[in-house]
């Protein structure tokens, strides 16, 4: 039964990131309702926190990817592209100065 509740809670978390206090309150309520031991409650809390951290990391990665795609659609160059173009301009300026002399 605990496994079913864990799976339900973990599924329900989705991309939500729970605060420490909220997670502890939730586990406290579940301990009371389901007569969970302190050890079972701690394990559940640890699992919820780990899942929340993983979901937060995934959400951050998705957000970074979407920003990158949006910048590409807008035609904004990356730092690498900018530095490459800067080197080319510097080289062309040197050639132009050499021709002027």
Image (cartoon, helix red, strand yellow):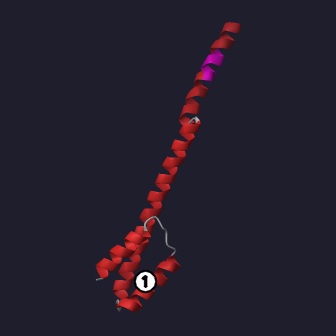
Q: Which residue is found at the position 54% from the left and 35% from the top? A: 80
Disc 1 crowd rating (10 Å Cα; few below 14, some 14-19, many 20+) is many
Q: Quadrant of the C terminus?
A: top right
In the displayed structure, 60 sits above or below 99; it is below
Q: Is residue 69 above or below residue 85?
A: below
* Quadrant of the image occupied by residue 81: top right
Q: Is residue 93 magenta?
A: yes
**Image coordinates for residue 51, horizontal then vertical, percent:** 40, 68
Q: Residue at x 51, y 50 (%)?
A: 64
Q: Residue 88 location in percent, x, y?
A: 58, 22
Q: Residue at x 47, y 53 (%)?
A: 62
Tell which of 43 and 30 is nearer to you.
30
Q: Is residue 74 placed above or below 37 in the rendered structure?
A: above
| Span colored in magenta | 89-94
x, y (%) of residue 28?
44, 87
Q: Position of residue 65 (x, y in %)?
A: 49, 48
Residue 50, visible in the rendered structure: no
Depth check: give the residue in front, 58 or 7: 7
In the rendered view, does 77 fall on the left or right side of 17? Answer: right
- Residue at far right of view: 101
User: Would you say residue 61 is visible in this rendering?
Assistant: yes
Q: Which residue is mark 1?
A: 27
Tally the marks: 1
- Comparing 67 with 40, the one in front is 67
- The question of residue 25 being in magenta is answered with no
Disc 1 element: helix
In the image, taking residue 88 as reference, residue 61 lies left or right, namely left
């Amino acid at each position: 039964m605990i496994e079913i509740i864990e799976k339900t809670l973990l599924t329900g978390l989705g991309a939500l990131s729970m605060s420490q206090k909220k997670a502890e309150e939730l586990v406290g309520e579940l301990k009371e309702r389901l007569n969970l031991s302190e050890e079972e409650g701690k394990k559940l809390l640890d699992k919820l926190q780990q899942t929340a951290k993983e979901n937060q990391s995934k959400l951050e990665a998705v957000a970074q990817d979407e920003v990158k795609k949006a910048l590409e659609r807008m035609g904004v160059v990356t730092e690498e592209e900018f530095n490459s173009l800067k080197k080319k301009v510097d080289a062309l300026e040197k050639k132009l100065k050499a021709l002027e002399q």
